[in-house]
Amino acid sequence: MGLADLSVDIGSLRLQNPLIAASGCFGYGVEYAEAVDLSTLGGVAVKGLFLKEREGHPPERIVETPSGMLNAIGLQGIGVHRFIREKLPELRQLRATVIVNICGSTLDEYVELARILSDADGVAALELNISCPNIKEGGITFGCSLHGTFDVVNAVKKVTPLPVIPKLTPNVTDVASFARASEDAGADAVSLVNTFLAMAIDVETRRPKLSNIVGGLSGPAIRPIAVRMVYECRRAVKIPVIGMGGIANARDVLEFIIAGATAVQVGTANFVDPFIWAKLLDGITDYMRRHNLARISDLTGTIDTTSREKQWISS
Amino acid sequence: MLVDVEARVLRNTRLSSDYNVIALAAPDIAAAVQPGQFVMVKSGRSGDPLLRRPFSVFEVLRSNDRVEGLTLLSKRVGATTSILYEAVEGDTISCLGPLGRPFEPVDAGTEAWMVAGGVGLAPFATLGEALVTRRIQTTLFYGARTGAELFYLDWFTARGIRLVLATEDGSAGVRARITVPLERELGSRLPDPGSRSDVMIYACGPEPMLEAVANVAAKYKRSSQLSVERTMGCGMGGCYSCVIPVRDAQSVRHYVRSCIAGPVFKGEDLVWD
């Protein structure tokens, strides 16, 4: 068998493999250039950008929970103009496939960001952050309303030739309906899940452990819920689903792909092991060899839900 | 170069009921580390604890001119430090580094005063050695709750480093916070009009101590370099958890990531909320 074909298509964008560094967990990518050759990743989703710089929340910004972590960073960031000036040239030089995560307080801000980034050299796709649980002023208000989701995707699609990927929140009753609204509005793919709204309290002091009181839960603790949501979205839409939530090894990647993900994002695990990417690729190619799979894209959505009862009876 | 080493525990010395010094076979990190830099430690393969924790490199271990590893000074306060306290020879501890901005050395002719509070002693063994090697006159101001929690005193004196001790209970040194003898010595130099570069103050310890050291340094117009510790997620600038407020050149306050902008900061740059 020849070399395994790891490439996947997200709209018009072909990724050389399905592994994307998750936004908010990889800085602007350049921070990790010493640990990983960014050109070997399927994509790098950079930290969410507003038009302007933002300070974010005061510390404490993270707290560890069983098999997970809560964060309320508050989208500290350098703003789109400094990003284009200070980070994008280096990302181009490193030959990273750059997915820019954009956040707006208003529909116009998303549109403006999309316009600016469409003119910048070296942006491969736009991920719409309509799901950050940690800030009040926008984003999530779009992501928690079907009309809002439709409107923001629709408006951004009108001004950019780049693939548009709304990042969905799991903090809704039926995430698949948000995937459908995204598809109806012309989204090229959806990515999910952002973090689960959660909180932790110090019982001795009775104080919240995060300055923002509530934050977003990520890490292996959320993986089974995220897998279920990817599965639901896969059944609801035809556009690619990019899955994420607690991936820590190659088996977790494969689980998301089998559930219906075309590509995956890795976040919290990168904090623990910045060298994780080569290990994930090795694990995926080993699986493909063992299962005689030529193309990783053939594995997407291949979950076998047929009844096993007869086998149990006969065994 | 950044490396992640599955480091074997060479030995683990318990200094008290909650302090220990753990020696790890991480020669690549030890050979590259500069005073003030840190490593991110993962003390188990399971999801609990999930994240790594930052530790200053305490000592670089050499035998016959060969670097064989490093040690970490740890105080048992949580899950990772408990595992480090209980670890035995032959265990493995994942160690990622070296990370962060190191201390800047002083020029010949300038004295170095290192101010340590409790487990904040950690970066001063490597810094002290580097300074002494450069023939810098070096003093360690070292404070703790009680004399039984002052460690490695002979280690420092054997290298010609002068000690000034303070304890909260008076069981060793002066009964005071360590900034009291620090201020007294700075004050006693005032009649000498010497330039403000006659002493460089280095400090590591709890943040209230660092703030006090920064204030004392500013009051007596001396420079300071402070090693801070904030809750850190990744140590590499990825997560934006460990931010600390600084004043930039335009005097505007903003958050920077202490893992990559620090952990060593100039005292005059930090803003104390």
Image (cartoon, rainbow, N blue to C red):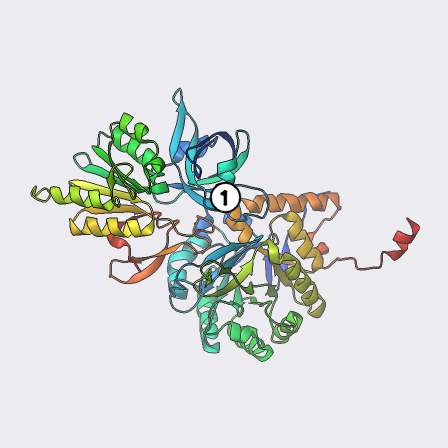
Asked if residue A211 is positioned above or below residue B136 in the image, the reply reads below
Q: How many marks?
A: 1
Question: In the image, is residue B223 above or below residue B150?
Answer: below
Whole-percent x, y for residue A92 in the image: 46, 54
Q: Quadrant of the N terminus of chain B?
A: top left
Instruction: Say whether residue A234 is left or right of residue A270.
Output: right
Q: Nearer the viewer, residue A284 or B174?
A: B174
Amino acid at the residue labelled 1: Thr
Question: Does residue A95 show up?
Answer: yes
Tell me: B215 left or right of A272: left
Q: Secondary structure at mark 1?
A: helix
Q: Is residue A264 in view from this perspective?
A: no
Q: Residue at x 42, y 39 (%)?
A: B74
Q: Residue A78: give x, y in percent of width and height.
A: 39, 62
Residue A22 located left or right of residue B163: right
Residue at the farthest bottom position: A147
Residue placed under numbered mark 1 in the picture = B80
Residue occupying the far top of the picture: B64
Give how far across and how far down residue B87 sits, in percent: 52, 35
